Amino acid sequence: DAGVTQSPTHLIKTRGQQVTLRCSPISGHKSVSWYQQVLGQGPQFIFQYYEKEERGRGNFPDRFSARQFPNYSSELNVNALLLGDSALYLCASSFGGGGTEAFFGQGTRLTVV
Amino acid sequence: AQRVTQPEKLLSVFKGAPVELKCNYSYSGSPELFWYVQYSRQRLQLLLRHISRESIKGFTADLNKGETSFHLKKPFAQEEDSAMYYCALYNQGGKLIFGQGTELSVKP
């Protein structure tokens, strides 16, 4: 049973660099959302994509961008990395774009040094 | 502003004791609320949602609109219930607003 998969699982980057995180949703799911989870905090919403269109955006700077591909997989890009971007980045997929159940991936641990 | 508050970072109980994890929310409109759980080294997963009104693993949660609360309860805690629990509120635009989480530790 293939759940939501994210790659890579761990990543170390230097300040100022750019990073791309990847997510493959559950087969048949058309919506992908991205969350940032800083240590000791709950996940914080970054983006939602449904049917390849951006449906929601959280309170994050323009350095954060994302896209969804025709096969519904998604990428999250972060430019000009700051130390404060160090976090666990979670991807969640759901069948619809509304409040249907979200299934989470295991996350990508990003460390910025 | 929409917000979810979980006032306890850590809740420690003994096996067999009742458990209540508190969740309060701020939302203008009819809220859609969830409890997510994360067991050690596992991914975040849905435990229950208020719409379904079901009991999962012995846990229940009742939406109290008057008190704007959605507390998670279990009458008899088990050691395998030890985990991180997050209350979440669904907002428009596919956004889940999470609380800070409560770590539940069930001691033998």
Image (cartoon, helix red, strand yellow):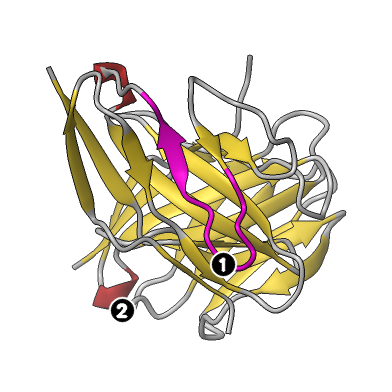
Q: Which residues are magenta?
A: B62-75
Which mark is in front, 2 or 1? 1
Q: Position of residue B89 (x, y in %)?
A: 60, 60
Taking the spot 42% from the left edge, 42% from the top edge, the residue there is: A8
Secondary element type, mark 1: loop
Taking the spot 33% from the left edge, 25% from the top edge, the residue there is: B81
Q: Position of residue B96 (x, y in %)?
A: 61, 60
Question: Looking at the picture, which amino acid does disc 1 mark?
Answer: Thr
Q: Chain of mark 1?
A: B
Q: Residue B43 is drawn in which quadrant?
A: top left
B27 or B19, which lies in front? Answer: B19
- As for residue A69 lying within the magenta part, the answer is no
| Vertical relation: A45 (above or below) B22 | below
Q: Chain of mark 2?
A: A
Name the quarter where the C terminus of chain B is drawn. Answer: top left
- The residue that label 2 is drawn on is A82
Q: Which mark is residue B68?
A: 1
Q: Position of residue B45 (x, y in %)?
A: 52, 34
Task: Count the marks.
Answer: 2
| Vertical relation: B42 (above or below) A23 | above
Q: Which mark is residue B24?
A: none
A7 or A46, which lies in front? Answer: A46
